[in-house]
Image: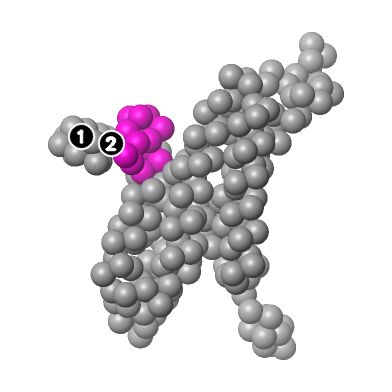
């Protein structure tokens, strides 16, 4: 990602957060905090490059890992679309501009965050592969990405159902660790699996569509 692209991403988030802060109503006030939390790991990912020293890279990397689940967490916020009560008595969608405005408020940060978040996971996985000297490992970058998405899926469960935020690790680490140790169940694992598969589908689609043109051209030459 170029410097211009990074600043465009920042402009989108800062602009959206500022706009929502001025216009959103109480029912969707959660969107302000959740969008900010989703942006933090994206901003941190911009600093996880090969130019960082080993110590700084791993410090930022750990913080990024703890905050990244906030990005796919936005997918679960889409359930709040039910608050819009979009259907009229006849069963058709209502044409209410304020309702569609709120729809855009919910969907826009989710779509943008998932796309950029998926990109950042892939880039960080590539850098981890280099720093861990796993460049000769077949599909090492993909395997690291898959592992990161699994961690993020567990984080989404913790945030959505246990209501434990990342900052709690700094405030009450013992309480958080006790809750994490007791959270494991078949239902919890089923939810994590679903979120993991959802992220993998998005990641697979992203990787497919971002295959270098030269590779696509070569493959298209094959019978």
In this rendered view, identify the residue nearer to me: 84 or 33: 33
Q: Is 164 or 219 nearer to us in this picture?
A: 164
Where is residue 49, by image quadrant?
bottom left
Q: Could you tell whether 111 is left or right of 201 in the image?
A: right
Q: Please tell me which residue is depicted at 32% across the width and 33% down the height of the picture.
A: 164
Indicate left or right for 34 with 106 as reference.
left
Q: Nearer the viewer, residue 27 or 44?
A: 44
Residue name at image x 58 percent, y 19 percent: 26
x and y, in percent, of residue 200 in the image: 49, 56
Q: Quadrant of residue 70?
A: top left
Residue 93: horizontal and vertical position, in percent?
A: 79, 24
| Up-down relation of residue 94 to residue 71 (above or below) | above
Return the mark for residue 168: 2
Taking the magenta stretch, the answer to whether it contains residue 159 is: yes
**Residue at the disc numbered 1:** 172
For residue 117, above or below residue 1 = above
């Amino acid at each position: 990602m170029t410097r211009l692209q990074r600043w465009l991403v920042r402009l989108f988030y800062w602009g959206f957060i500022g706009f929502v802060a001025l216009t959103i109503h109480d029912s969707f006030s959660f969107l302000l905090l959740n969008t900010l939390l989703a942006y933090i790991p994206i901003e941190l990912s911009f600093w996880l490059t090969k130019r960082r020293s080993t110590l700084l890279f791993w410090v930022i990397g750990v913080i990024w890992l703890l905050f990244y689940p906030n990005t796919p967490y936005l997918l679960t916020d889409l359930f709040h679309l039910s608050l819009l009560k979009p259907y009229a008595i006849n069963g058709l969608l209502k044409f209410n501009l304020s309702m569609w405005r709120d729809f855009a408020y919910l969907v826009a940060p989710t779509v943008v965050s998932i796309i950029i978040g998926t990109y950042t996971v892939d880039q960080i996985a590539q850098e981890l592969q280099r720093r861990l000297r796993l460049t000769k490992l077949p599909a090492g970058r993909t395997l690291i990405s898959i592992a990161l998405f699994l961690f993020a899926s567990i984080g989404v469960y913790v945030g959505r159902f246990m209501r434990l935020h990342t900052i709690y690790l700094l405030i009450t680490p013992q309480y958080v660790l006790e809750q994490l140790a007791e959270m494991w169940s078949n239902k919890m694992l089923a939810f994590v699996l679903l979120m993991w598969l959802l992220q993998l589908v998005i990641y697979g689609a992203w990787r497919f569509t971002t295959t270098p043109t030269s590779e696509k051209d070569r493959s298209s030459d094959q019978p």
